[in-house]
Image (cartoon, rainbow, N blue to C red):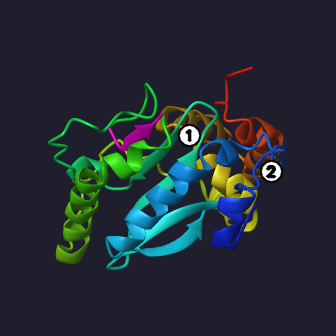
Amino acid sequence: MITEIEDYFTKGCGRCERFDTPDCSTRRWSDGLRALRQICRDAGLSETVKWAHPCYVHAGRNIAIIGAFRTDFRLSFFDAALMKDPAGLLERQGANTRYADMIRFTDNAQPAEMEPTLVSYLKEAMGYAEAGVKPPKDESEIVLPDELIAALDTDDELAAAFHHLTPGRQKSYVINLNSAKKSATRVSRIAKFRDRILAGKGAMER
């Protein structure tokens, strides 16, 4: 996976075999991604790479992250539970996503056309970070087993893939691992689950 920000906009994220090929999703959305990047930077956000994607930070908090797919590209907000969404732009990333957290683009021209609204959303999120306002605690928050935490800490590719799973899929692995009484069994299961996690699947999906 990439560690340099410029590589994302020229080669892709490095998480699949389409990396640095004409078929990479970042190539199709190149103009839109660059426009979105500039909007985030002009809003005063700091730019870094996290989970092999451009991530925008302010006041010590992750604010938003950019992603590209075959059918669209997206700006996703981290503390979506706080966002007011006056323009009704935010969508849920999946059926198991609790809050609508992303703005989806299907045309390279859209970020520039939507710039004032995008800036207002970014500024709202930045304001929460500056004020130290955090989303309400999710009582159903997933608590990862120690063995899984250790595996994610030592395997960047696995960590990025697990982060991008829906909460429901993440929970499926936690439930499966917690059902094992021995730590060695949990470690063995994590090794067997690795390819499935990288493929974006849940523990029980084929």
Residue 183, position as x, y percentages in the image: 72, 52
Picture quadrant where residue 140 is located: top left
49, 147: nearer the viewer: 49
52, 8: nearer the viewer: 8
Q: Mark 1 points at which residue?
A: 170
Q: Which residue is drawn at 58% across and 65% down?
A: 50
Q: Name the residue under label 2.
A: 19
Q: Visible in this render: residue 42?
A: yes
Mark 1 / mark 2, whichever is N-terminal: 2
Quarter placement of the C terminus:
top right
Vertical side of 174 occupied by 206: above or below? above
Q: Which residue is drawn at 14% across and 42% down?
A: 86
Q: How many labels does the image show?
A: 2
Picture quadrant where residue 22 is located: top right
Give the residue type that dot 2 points to.
Answer: Phe
Q: Which of marks 1 and 2 is in front?
A: 2
Q: Which residue is drawn at 67% across and 23% down?
A: 204
Position of 199 with respect to 138 (left or right) is right
Secondary structure at badge 2 equals: loop
